């Protein structure tokens, strides 16, 4: 019987029992830069954008801890924090990662520590919106 | 509507009746060392926030959906007792929230709440409708080796995904004045200190540890139900609901709370679907979802229906019967059980066995309610004359719990003698709440009746008396 149960354990684990219980990101987009609970005060990178390398899909951030380059993937979510403008936050693109803007980056867990899970860019200029730099 | 203390005409919100749970687990319901508890003032602060703080939003609080007087959940019968201006119905009277915030029809008929778990880009079509899970016994159910699991699919919290962070996501989803959801305009976010307090309060609710099965049950049918529940070749319930809790033990030790795809979404004739309202499929954990949902504790199940993430089934008997059906046995979880079974069977039960398991769960629920009632009554009895308002609030909570005990036992035709003791205990507690000079004596008598009821359900032992 123990063997059977062990078999169940292995199979069920493979069927979803072991899905990573990370926080769902959907309400995250409405949380302003620096206020993500358990993240902003612990593990995220907060600073200003030094540069955005579209070719290599990396953004370089100048933070208190120093300058750090972080990779973006197709999975990386980019959000525009417009709360200082009292406007709703929106999804953005890498075109919004403009030099000098305040940014918060949550890095992916595990081995790929220099890859962003999500990025929030703070917009302070009235009229700024998604992809404004590309327009 | 449930009977509350008749003599009480004070405007105190019933919400404050949720007493801070005292950690004196009765022997039947304790096997492990009680975990350390946060300071009582932090819990009290969290309780106040939970039931009274609107975070400058649309008027809702956490307690709007997690009602103190409805086992920290809501169901259609309870919703029917609420006035039209209750904040639960904010989508019915706030023009800014009229569209795409809730579906009032599904809320009133099936206690379903709208959630944008897969994003806010298309509010017309991109949402799921979910029931309100109770928040009892979270200390036993949230943790897993993969991280905390919150909400129906285990991914309900933003930030670090913890129970502490859950409130932030809830404020954004359920509290906004408009669908712009601008922090500082449509709501304010909870502070770090508030999140600490809310977490402490939620962790204080209900059981602080799992039960150890089997219990020495007296009733023939519940006793047989427990046997089937624990039989890994028949009921197989204990594999994913270890000790009727929310953690899985699949043979290699307890793996904490886990997510499974049990096929609930494939159930035919789901009540919400029958209305003709738009109810998009719920893909569970993640985006895109993997179809899995996390495991709720069962000790508290019998009085917290409807059941499953979509409130698809009203009764505890129906919820048990689900696992005998095609939806479960054709699901990934059902296939897994079948693959591991020497005869290739997932879960196959007959009607009597389904009812027996449900009877066991009803008795488990009643025992937990009795445990809580005794704690509340004892706490009330310790209050002095000048603290009688606090004593009354504790008594009211005990009365509600006792009403639940009566309901779950009567609903299964179980233990009529225990029901008689519980009715007596309820009457005594109601009298105590109205009495100025005999409160202590009446409360002590109510405690004795609770113990008498418990002794009808399980074999008594010196440790329990």
Image (cartoon, grey):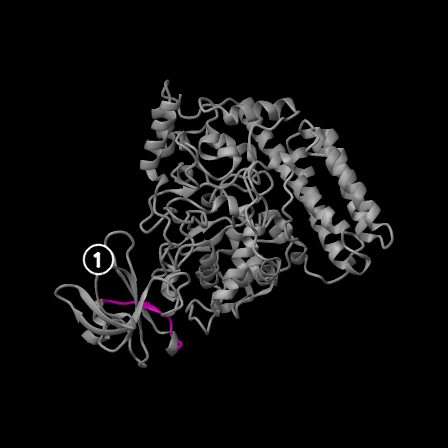
Is B452 displayed left or right of B43 in the figure?
right
Which residue occupies the extreme left position in the image? A55
**Vertical relation: B309 (above or below) B326:** below
Which residue occupies the extreme right position in the image? B437
**Residue depicted at 34% across the width and 27% down the height:** A7
Q: Quadrant of residue A122?
A: bottom left
Question: For numbered disc 1, what is the local secondary structure?
Answer: loop
| Visible residue check, residue A103 | no
- The image shows residue B90 at horizontal and vertical percentages of 54, 63
- The image shows residue B421 at horizontal and vertical percentages of 76, 35
Is B9 displayed left or right of A116 in the figure?
right
Q: Is residue A92 magenta?
A: yes
Q: Quadrant of residue B86?
A: bottom right
- The residue beneath circle 1 is A74
**Residue depicted at 22% across the width and 76% down the height:** A99
Q: Between B352 and B378, which is closer to the camera in this rendering? A: B378
Label 1: chain letter: A
The residues colored magenta run A86-93
Q: Between B36 and B416, which is closer to the camera in this rendering? A: B36
- The image shows residue A133 at horizontal and vertical percentages of 21, 76
Q: Quadrant of the C terminus of chain B?
A: top right
**Residue depicted at 52% across the width and 68% down the height:** B55
Q: Is residue A87 magenta?
A: yes
User: What kind of secondary structure does the magenta stretch mostly adopt?
Assistant: loop
Dot 1 crowding, Cα within 10 Å, few <14, some 14–19, many 20+: few
Q: Quadrant of residue A10?
A: top left
| Visible residue check, residue B144 | yes
């Amino acid at each position: 019987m123990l063997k059977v149960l062990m078999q169940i354990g292995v199979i069920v684990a493979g069927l979803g029992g072991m899905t990573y219980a990370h926080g769902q990101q959907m309400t995250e987009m409405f949380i302003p830069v620096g206020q993500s609970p358990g993240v902003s005060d612990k593990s995220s990178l907060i600073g200003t954008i030094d540069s955005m390398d579209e070719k290599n899909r990396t953004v370089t951030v100048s933070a208190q801890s120093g300058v750090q380059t972080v990779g973006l993937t197709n999975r990386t979510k980019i959000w525009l924090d417009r709360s200082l403008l009292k406007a709703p936050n929106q999804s953005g693109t890498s075109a919004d990662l403009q030099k000098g803007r305040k940014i918060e980056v949550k890095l992916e867990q595990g081995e790929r520590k220099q890859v962003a899970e999500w990025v929030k860019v703070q917009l302070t200029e009235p009229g700024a919106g998604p992809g404004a730099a590309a327009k | 509507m449930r009977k509350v203390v008749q003599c009480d005409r004070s405007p105190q919100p019933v919400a404050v009746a949720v007493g801070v749970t005292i950690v004196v687990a009765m022997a039947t319901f304790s096997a492990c060392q009680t975990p350390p508890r946060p300071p009582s003032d932090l819990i009290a602060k969290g309780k106040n926030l939970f039931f009274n703080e609107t975070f400058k939003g649309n008027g809702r609080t956490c307690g709007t959906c997690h009602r103190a007087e409805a086992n920290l959940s809501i169901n259609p019968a309870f919703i029917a007792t609420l006035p039209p201006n209750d904040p639960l119905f904010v989508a019915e009277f706030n023009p800014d929230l009229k569209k795409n915030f809730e579906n009032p029809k599904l809320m009133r008929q099936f206690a379903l709440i709208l959630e944008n778990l897969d994003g806010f880009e298309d509010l017309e079509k991109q949402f799921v409708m979910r029931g309100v899970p109770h928040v009892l016994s979270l200390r036993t159910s949230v943790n897993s080796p993969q991280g905390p699991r919150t909400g129906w699919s285990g991914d309900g919290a933003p930030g670090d995904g913890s129970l502490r962070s859950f409130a932030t996501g809830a404020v954004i989803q359920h509290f906004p004045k408009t669908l712009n959801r601008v922090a500082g305009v449509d709501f304010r976010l909870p502070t770090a200190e508030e999140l600490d307090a809310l977490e402490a309060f939620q962790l204080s609710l209900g059981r602080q540890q799992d039960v150890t099965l089997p219990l020495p049950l007296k009733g023939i049918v519940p006793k047989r139900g427990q046997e089937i529940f624990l039989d890994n070749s028949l009921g197989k319930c204990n594999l994913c609901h270890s000790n009727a809790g929310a953690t899985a033990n699949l043979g290699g030790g307890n793996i904490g709370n886990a997510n499974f795809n049990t096929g609930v979404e494939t159930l035919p004739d789901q009540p919400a679907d029958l209305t003709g309202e738009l109810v998009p499929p719920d893909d569970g954990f993640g985006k895109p979802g993997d179809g899995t949902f996390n495991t709720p504790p069962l000790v508290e199940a019998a009085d917290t229906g409807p059941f499953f993430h979509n409130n698809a089934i009203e009764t505890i008997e129906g919820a048990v019967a689900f696992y005998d059906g095609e939806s479960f046995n054709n699901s990934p979880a059902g296939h897994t059980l079948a693959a591991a079974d020497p005869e290739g069977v997932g879960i196959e039960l007959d009607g009597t066995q389904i009812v027996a398991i449900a009877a066991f769960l009803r008795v488990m629920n009643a025992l937990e309610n009795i445990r809580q009632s005794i704690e509340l009554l004892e706490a009330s009895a310790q209050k002095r004359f000048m603290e009688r308002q606090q004593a009354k609030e504790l008594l009211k909570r005990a009365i509600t719990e006792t009403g639940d005990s009566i309901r779950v036992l009567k609903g299964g035709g179980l233990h009529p003698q225990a029901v008689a003791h519980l009715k007596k205990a309820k009457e005594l507690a109601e009298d105590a709440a109205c009495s100025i000079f005999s409160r202590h004596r009446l409360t002590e008598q109510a405690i004795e009746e609770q113990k008498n009821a418990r002794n009808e359900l399980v074999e008594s032992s010196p440790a329990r008396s």
